[in-house]
Image (cartoon, grey):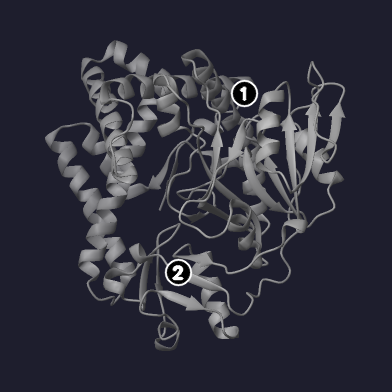
Amino acid sequence: MTPTDTALPKGFQAQIDLRCARDRDWRHLVGGAPTRLLRLSERAAGMVSAEGRITVLDDASGELVRTLLDANVAHPRPMFGPHDESVTVVIPVRDNQPGVDRLLRAVHGLRVIVVDDGSAAPITVPEDVRLLRFDTNRGPSAARNHGVAQADTEFVIFLDSDVVPLATPGAAADWVTALTAHFSDPAVGLVAPRIVGLPAAEPNLVERYEAGFSSLDMGQREAAIKPGSRVPYVPSAAMVVRRRAFTGFDEDLRVAEDVDLCWRMAAQGWCLRYDPVARVAHEHRSTLPSMLGRRRYYGTGAAFLADRHQRKAAPLAMRWPIAVAVVALLTRTRLGLAVGLLGAGYAGWAVRRRLGEMPGRDRVAASLTGQALAHGLVQAGGAVCRHYWPIGLVTALVSRRFRVLAAQVAVVDAVVAWIRHAQAAGRSPKVDPLSFLVLRRLDDLAYGTGLWQGALAQRDATALLPVIGR
């Protein structure tokens, strides 16, 4: 089902992402996903406060806010949402009684449905919690769908039994209100919190790595959830859906069912939001074999996604001038440097041309091109170590030049990721750089193994093919 009424209510606010407004020039906004230039008329720019805030007062301001939200250059600041009576928590579980007990204490006071997905020892719950049970294991997708079918509220919160909501720092609203307030926008069909590591008294190295670099953590910046964007999906371990928008998890999928759901809902026209103000702690894997086994399992899901969503599941994507520049620069030759500069120069010229008469367009074009080139190099480095490591291994066996390149890429990629995490968190990661290098490379090998395993099992190489656009 698609959203029918997308008109924003009076009083709804949006905040322009200040990274998209150079020198707070509200008339020219550059950013979003994909990156674009939005030119605002004098009238539209006049609706923006000095801090970049817009309030919906009439149809014109509502249309402006909708345009900016859809372009991902502004973020919602809703002021109200549904009451707790409009929400049901659905908890799928299999063989995790302690996790269910912990989670039920955290959601006390809300309507809760627990779906026992064929546990060996039947799950028990308090009398005020509704319990459903499968005699045999049918998978988390089937368990969640069954729970939703039995709920009679407008909104449903999915929480896995190995998570627990945390207090919302620096916010007056609790985690439920912080998430459900987004549904004051009638076009929003799904909202998800940030998933962080469950604090441990004396975490080991694997737990510290998972706490800082888990694939479930979508980061500190709020965003619209869109394929190909910075936040292309959110994990089903914790999310809230509008029942009218929810089309069900694909019960044929035991992995990547959350990605599939997000992409199907986005294709139907629903807005999906990621709000890291609300946080949910996840009990990460604590041993290296279990962590790597999970990463390999996640990797197998790419083939299923490629079968359903084609090129949205590509391991990397970039425009052709940037792709040419990246490949050329990685040759580390004088000719490669020259070709790389030509490719980057052409990309910069194309961006400058699209910016038209925007003030400071040369500086903006250079900045955007530099960011695209840096992102392309990071993508390529990650692909060599992660998605294409089997090809890289074979190539390294016959080429000394490639062996040196692969070793350099493996180190630089880890150093860049470690520094980026430190900058984002405002402190050094709890994993030293050398340990991080080793764990990141093992992480990539495990995921890449699953990726190739899935592609071979499906006899479909779509999940291995990059997307090179104009």
- Which residue is at 56% across, 78% downward? 63
* Mark seen at residue 15: 2
Q: CA distance from mark 2 to mark 1?
A: 46 Å
Residue 249 at x, y percent in the picture: 73, 40
Element under disc 2: strand
Q: Is residue 142 left or right of residue 305?
A: right
Decide which of 265, 194 is in the foreground and name it: 194
- Which residue is at 56% across, 19% downward? 453
Is residue 387 shown to the viewer in this render? no
Q: Earlier in the sequence, mark 2 or mark 1?
A: 2
- In the rendered view, would you say 405 is above or below 84? above
Q: Of the residues shown, which amino acid type is indicated by label 1?
A: Arg
Quadrant, the N terminus: bottom right
> What is the number of callouts on the image?
2
Residue 35 at x, y percent in the picture: 40, 59
Q: Quadrant of residue 123?
A: top right
Element under disc 1: loop
Decide which of 90, 254 is in the foreground and name it: 90
- In the rendered view, would you say 135 is above or below 112? above
Q: Residue furthest top?
A: 397
Is residue 246 shown to the viewer in this render? yes
Residue 391 at x, y percent in the picture: 40, 20
- Which residue is at 72% across, 20% downward? 95
Decide which of 78, 393 is in the foreground and name it: 78
* Mark 1, residue position: 459
Task: Mark 2 vs mark 1: give the one in front.
Answer: 2
Q: Of the residues shown, which amino acid type is indicated by label 2?
A: Gln
